[in-house]
Image (spheres, rainbow, N blue to C red):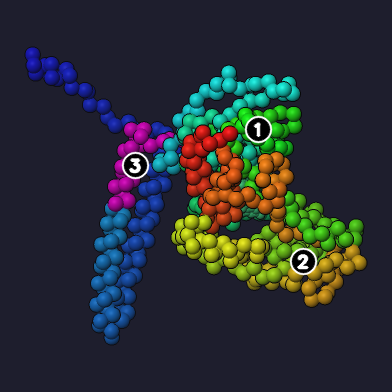
Amino acid sequence: MGHTGARAGRRPRVPPALVTDLPVLAALVLCWLTISVAWAHLATGMALVGLIGVHLRPRWPQVRRRLGYWSFLAAAAGMTVTGLLRWAGVAAAHLARRGELPAARPGRDAPLVDPASPAPAARPAPAPTRRDEEGNSGMSTERFDTVVIGGGQAGMPVGYHLARQGRDFVIVDVGGAVGQAWRERWDSLRLFSPAHFTKLPGMTFPAASRHLPSTDEMADYLRAYAARFDLPLRLGWRVDQLSRDHDGYLIASAGRSLRASRVVVATGPALRPRVPQAADRLDPSVVSLHSVDYRNPDQLRDGPVLVVGAGNSGAEIALDVAPTHHVVLAGRDVGRLPISLGGPVYRVMNALLTVDTALGRRFMASTAGKGGTPLVRVRPEHLARAGVERAPRLADVVDGRPQLDDGRVLDVATVIWCTGYLPDYSWIALPGFPRTGLPAHHRGVVIDQPGLYLIGLPFLSRMASSLAGGVGADARHIADHLPAAAGTAP
Ligand SMILES: Cc1cc2nc3c(=O)[nH]c(=O)nc-3n(C[C@H](O)[C@H](O)[C@H](O)COP(=O)(O)OP(=O)(O)OC[C@H]3O[C@@H](n4cnc5c(N)ncnc54)[C@H](O)[C@@H]3O)c2cc1C
């Protein structure tokens, strides 16, 4: 009896389920191929080192002995590493079969998700009784714990962290679609940061790690990000005014408004194009446009083009225009970034150069107000090869024509101003809040305005604060600060 009972209690052996999920299967095949290729490379490398050590230096017995020894050591290390990778692959396959790794969610266009960053818990259902108040003006006003103004690469990760905390929030953006700001940049622009450093928290950029994304790919990524984490968005909302009264913050947008205890301003550093006043004195026959309005050379009149400002935008636009027009690129030499953006050295520097380290503060002070960050991609020889004429800074506009520092007056058909942007907070009507500069803050936590936060600005907390690969840390800091702000908020 006992024997039969034990047998009856035993669960029938089920053959392991086949991996039928196509993305998981593809990932496994890819993983296997990568390991095999790595193995082949390693074996070839070891063979070469061994060959050099044993055969090519017969007259240097010591070198030979050493190289032979190192090749042996490399072989052992290589075998260990690839062995470990194999086991990691097997373990991953096992976990995927058991469904412990997050699989791509059907219907979402964000296939690559960090296992370490699970999708946030579903947000609590909004409490309708707290919303839809009637203000004195008769205007309907919804209330949220937090409103994020701006749904770009800085606003999105704030939303990600708020959603993980189960907070009641909404992201408002003037754009009619997520990522619109990126789609409005010039056609040939590719990001300077490679895919591996264009990653917001929780979701890798779906491209090879060194790929430089196009603006459309970046916009698609942001759209997929919002969908993946089900971020609550109000699109087509231009916030005209942010003010505060006894009842908290009031966010007004063309006859609509929202109330919030906390507000995160993520409207980006590119709010108002900076164009020198001299531009007004250009002859009306000269086409004058800022880089924000530049799309491609078809927009330009026939004839020479002056690009003012030799930073990254200026250099890239000069190269874009050079095949069809004679281009003069005017501006000081901003130098070249000597390290790769998002590479290991950059990451170490980003960890060291923060507003909380003396080194970081010194670096910040030394770069402040200089304008024009070092060139990331373009080198002087690229410009020379494309026929771009380098020239000193623009001095003035004389008789409707641009004059350079060396006295030359240029007869050009078009001027493209690649002269950067100015902050514009004229829509923030809070006592003591500066209209153009930044208010006093520490890592985006505004000091004199309880419950107000800034994000996405250059060197907000560290070197990479304004980049997709660096803004996540600031978003986390702000989201973690929010609960502490409860009670202090108005
Ligand atoms: C030419 C160029 C190249 C770049 N290359 C890279 C790169 O390689 N890698 C990288 O990581 N970054 C890159 N950037 C991004 C840049 O460095 C900025 O730091 C980045 O755009 C900041 O992100 P953000 O979300 O703060 O701002 P934005 O991307 O500008 O987003 C701000 C959002 O706020 C919205 N908004 C603005 N005002 C209002 C308002 N009043 N009401 C409602 N919504 C509003 C806008 O519609 C927009 O969606 C590049 C930018 C430019 C211009």
Q: Earlier in the sequence, mark 3 or mark 2?
A: 3
Number of marks in picture? 3
Residue, x 79% and y 60% (percent of image)?
276
Q: Is mark 3 within 8 Å of ligand 1?
A: no
The amino acid sitting under disc 2 is: Val
The numbered dot on residue 327 is 2
The amino acid sitting under disc 1 is: Asp
Q: Earlier in the sequence, mark 1 or mark 3?
A: 3
Residue, x 68% and y 20% (percent of image)?
134
Q: Are marks 1 and 3 in contact (CB under 8 Å)?
A: no
Q: Position of residue 359 (x, y in %)?
A: 49, 64
From the image, tell me which residue sits under label 3.
92
CA gap, disc 1 to disc 3? 54 Å
The quarter of the picture where the C terminus appears is top right
The quarter of the picture where the N terminus appears is top left
From the image, tell me which residue sits under label 1.
245
**Mark 1 or 3, which is nearer the eye?**
1
Q: Earlier in the sequence, mark 2 or mark 1?
A: 1
Local secondary structure at mark 3:
helix
The amino acid sitting under disc 3 is: Ala
Q: Is residue 86 magenta?
A: yes
Compared with residue 468, is residue 2 higher up or lower down, i.e. above or below?
A: above
**Mark 2 or 1, which is nearer the eye?**
1
Q: Main secondary structure of the magenta part?
A: helix
Compared with residue 479, is residue 9 higher up or lower down, i.e. above or below?
A: above
Q: Is residue 102 magenta?
A: yes
